[in-house]
Image (cartoon, helix red, strand yellow):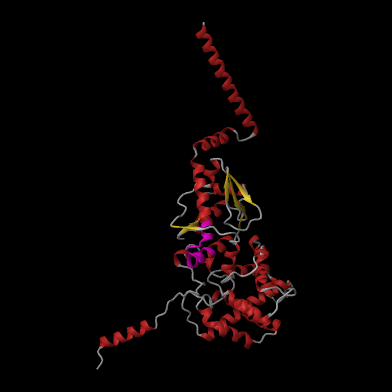
Amino acid sequence: MAYKGDVVRINVKEMLEGARAPITAECCIYKVPFSIRRHNEEAYTPKVVSIGPFHHGNPRLQDMEKHKLFYSKAFLQRTQTTSDSFIGKIEEMEPEFRRCYSHTLEFSKEQLVKIIFVDCAFILELFCRYRDRVPKKDDMCASIPRLSYSIAYDLLLLENQVPFSVLESLFSLSFPSPGADFPSFLKLTFNFFQQLKRSVFYNINDFHKNNGIRHFTDLIRTFHLQYPLPSRIDGKIIEHLPSATELSEAGLRFKVLENESCLLKLDFSGRVLEIPQLVVDDGIETLFRNMLALEQCHYPFQSYITDYLHFLDFLVNTNRDVDILVREKVFLNWLGDTDSVATMINGLVKDITVYNTGSQFLDVSEKLNAFHKNPWRKLKSALRRDYCRGPWQTAASTAAVILLILSFVQTVCSILQVIHQ
């Protein structure tokens, strides 16, 4: 006769035997942690189209499901690929791509294969149609620029991803020998995302292979890192940095690094800080927040985008700092309102954990702190600010100094004359 305690022990044993690590080495697609997500829910949530299992079935996104099916059918017809071969390839990869998601998926194998089939075929046909540039009247996705633009941003959200390797495999199945007449999947991807008008997407010639890209969010992060990455120093982070206003008042001059898409390339020498130009528009917060979330979840010790935004957060405290960076063309402000730019930048790194910092940012920060602490520079800057703001004021100040010196000389001469009498 089994006792109640024995039954409980047996049930617990069975429960533990079925336990598996919720996050594996293959995991690369994450739900954004609540502590980060709560600061701007919309930045992580698709507005038009769901991709992958995390947002599948969202009632707000149902309007696009018919278009996804329409595109899926069109892609199979475009490539003369059978649905059986397409589905067979996805079924073969299912155990692998299921492990790419951070949360346990409640979908059966059949359901998940169906989701991936429709979403991948939709993306491939979408990219092909954007390349063709011949939209049809009944083709809402390609014929309405605003919608195409929104879809492009949705495809860059961390929670709205399918593995890049799955898309490449299905593309290779459909186009066994892409060549002069048809580009590689990577070039097709570049071409589609160029509509976002990001200079970073124009460097396809410097990006010859996918470099182990995991998904589109990972891709755009990698685009921004096309530069020899600096070493990282464990336990060392930027603890203080003067604002742009404070540095400017100390005599610092900001200079834009021309034609530079890598955000990590900073240089400080003399009294000039060279920094890449940043286009601040409606989409930049979404891109930055999703790259930050990816680094927090997947690259906590290689958080290069976090380094850059942490650096910016120190430089920008108020709209006065934004005004200086706009005037020096470091920021190309398409938002219009400088208060909004300051609020956006200050909000990006809230609840973001920094484990270590790249040596380049640490080195530049130390030099800027030393520059700002120099009392002689502060004095020169104060004199320049208060007495030499324009040519007339400079001339007046110079004349006043000359008169002061002459008055002093005259006084000394008078004193010497009295003494010698």
* Region of the chain picked out in magenta, as a range: 291-307
Q: In the rendered structure, does residue 292 fall within the stretch colored magenta?
A: yes
Whether residue 126 sits left or right of residue 349 in the image: it is right
Q: Name the residue nearer the viewer: 131 or 10.
A: 10
Please tell me in which quadrant of the rendered image residue 23 appears. bottom left
Q: Please, is residue 394 above or below residue 413 in the view?
A: below
- Is residue 123 visible to the viewer in this orientation of the structure? yes
Q: In the rendered structure, does residue 203 fall within the stretch colored magenta?
A: no
Residue 58 percent coordinates (x, y): 53, 76
Please tell me in which quadrant of the rendered image residue 165 appears. bottom right
Residue 67 percent coordinates (x, y): 64, 78
Whether residue 99 sits left or right of residue 15 in the image: it is right
Q: Please, is residue 107 above or below residue 315 in the view?
A: below
Report the label total. Answer: 0
Residue 9 percent coordinates (x, y): 29, 85
Q: Name the residue nearer the viewer: 154 or 315.
A: 315
Q: Residue furthest bottom?
A: 1
Secondary structure of the magenta portion, mostly?
A: helix
Q: Name the residue nearer the viewer: 19 or 359.
A: 359
